[in-house]
Image (spheres, rainbow, N blue to C red):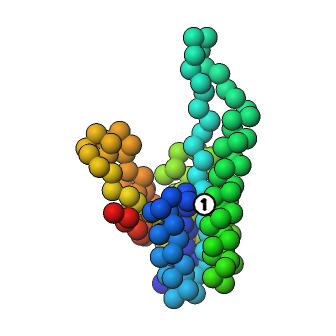
Amino acid sequence: MYKRILLAYDGSESGQKALLDCRDLAQWSQSELHLVAVMPPPAAFIGGEGGIYDPEREKEEELAYREILSDGLKRLADCGHDAKGEVVMGDAVDEIVGCAKKIGANLIVVGHKHLEGWARRWWRGSISKSLIEHAPCSVLVVITP
C-alpha cells in the first residue's frame, strides 16, 4: 500500500486535479503527503553582449513557486491533511525522482494535460513519460483533457 505519496505540484489545472485525486487516495490509504514544486534553473537573458543573469528575476520566480506550493498545502490543510512541501530548483524529472528517493515515496502523483499537435508535444516533451522511466516507485499520471 502507499504510505508516502509525493505530488509534483505546479498549480496548473492538471496539477490541481492531481492534488484532488492525491488527497482522496491519501485519505483512503492513510498516507503521508509530500508536495514538491520544481522551479526551472535560472535562464540567462541572451543579448548582444552575451548572457546576463538577473538575481532579482530569480527571487521573483522563487517567490512565485513558494506561493504555488503554499496554495497546494493550504488546499490539503483545508481538507484535514497535514502535508509537507518544498520548492526545489533544477530539471523537473531529476528533482522529482530525487525527492521521491529522499522521502522513500511509494507513489508519485503528477498531473498531465494532453498537448494539441505533434510539434508542441515534440518541443515540450513529456515530464510524466520521462518520470515513468526514471521513478523509483509507482507513478500515477492524472490526465486533464
Q: Position of residue 98 (x, y in %)?
A: 57, 56
Residue type, label 1: Val
Q: Which residue is drawn at the image coordinates 69% and 46% (left, top)? A: 62
User: Residue lying farthest top?
Assistant: 49
Q: Which residue is drawn at the image coordinates 60% and 47% (left, top)? A: 39
6 w.r.t. 54: above or below: below
Question: Which of the 4 image quadrants contains residue 118?
Answer: top left
Q: Position of residue 58 (x, y in %)?
A: 69, 38
Residue 55 visible in the snapshot:
yes
Question: Which of the 4 image quadrants contains residue 48?
Answer: top right
Residue 106 visible in the snapshot:
no
Quadrant in which the C terminus is drawn = bottom left
* Number of disc labels: 1
Q: Position of residue 72 (x, y in %)?
A: 62, 67
**Nearer the observer, 23 or 94:** 23
User: Pointer 1: what residue?
Assistant: 36
Q: Which residue is drawn at the image coordinates 66% and 69% (left, top)? A: 73
**Nearer the observer, 13 or 51:** 13
